[in-house]
Amino acid sequence: MAYTNAVNNTDNALENFRQLGTDEQLAWLWFVYEQMGDAVTPAAPGAASPEIAGGLFEQVKEQSHEQQLDTMRAIANRDANNQICREYGSLSANTKLAFWFFLSCGMDEGTIIPMPDDYKMSDEGQNLLSALESMELEQQIRVLRDAVAGMGAEPAAGAAI
């Protein structure tokens, strides 16, 4: 994955994101919020449903740290067997952004499983992060929104979520 292919090209950046492994995607999202959270968090304040994102966050927060990681992996992998993943799948893209913001804050506070202190992002992930940082704010938000919008599973048919 070439840094130059992702710079100022949101489609390439999104494709590069999708080529990252599951844990690398999760780490990349955390690093984005850690390094750029103040800029990308208010992406669409009127379009997100923070109450809904907060409710889903609370469900994750109640889990053990290992279960939290399993849930985040399930969301990234679109695991239709995971109820929280299906609930996440029914959210708007902006509400999904809010959910990941809440997870990032929870990781900082210690209520959500933290990043290992010795974690080193791959060159591909670091290149993608650098490419995102070099983009205009609207492009950054588009890449981030599209990345999280592609996660989650479709709600189950019938009354089940």
Image (cartoon, helix red, strand yellow):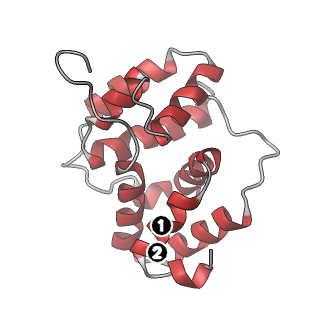
Quarter of the picture holding the N terminus: bottom right
CB of mark 1 within 8 Å of CB of mark 2?
yes
Q: Quick one: label 1, few (<14), some, or many (20+) residues within 10 Å?
A: some
Q: Residue furthest front?
A: 157
Quarter of the image for residue 48 reads top left
Q: Which residue is mark 2?
A: 12
Which residue: 38% across, 21% down? 83
| Residue 95, x across and y down, in percent | 29, 42
Q: Which amino acid, by three-letter code, is at mark 2?
A: Asn
* Above-or-below relation of 25 to 125: above
Mark 2 neighbour class, 10 Å CA radius: few under 14, some 14 to 19, many 20 or more: some
Q: Nearer the viewer, residue 115 or 15?
A: 15
Q: Which residue is denoted by mark 1 in the rendering?
A: 15
Taking the view exactly as shown, the residue that stands out farthest to the bottom is 4
Q: Amino acid at mark 1?
A: Glu
Judged from the image, the secondary structure of the residue bearing numbered disc 2 is helix
Classify 62 as above or below 107.
above
Identity of the residue furthest to the right in this view: 118
Could you say where residue 139 lies in the image, as x and y percent from the top left?
37, 72
Q: Position of residue 32 (x, y in %)?
A: 54, 56
Instruction: Say which residue appears at 48% left-offset and 71% top-offset.
Output: 13
Task: Describe the element under mark 1 as helix, strand or loop.
Answer: helix
- For the residues labelled 1 and 2, the Cα–Cα distance comes to 5 Å
What residue is shown at x 57% (from left), y 85% (from top)? Answer: 4
Count the numbered circles shown: 2
Q: Is residue 155 above or below residue 13?
A: above
Please indicate, yes or no, whether residue 112 appears anywhere in the rendered image: no
Residue depicted at x 37% and y 47%: 97
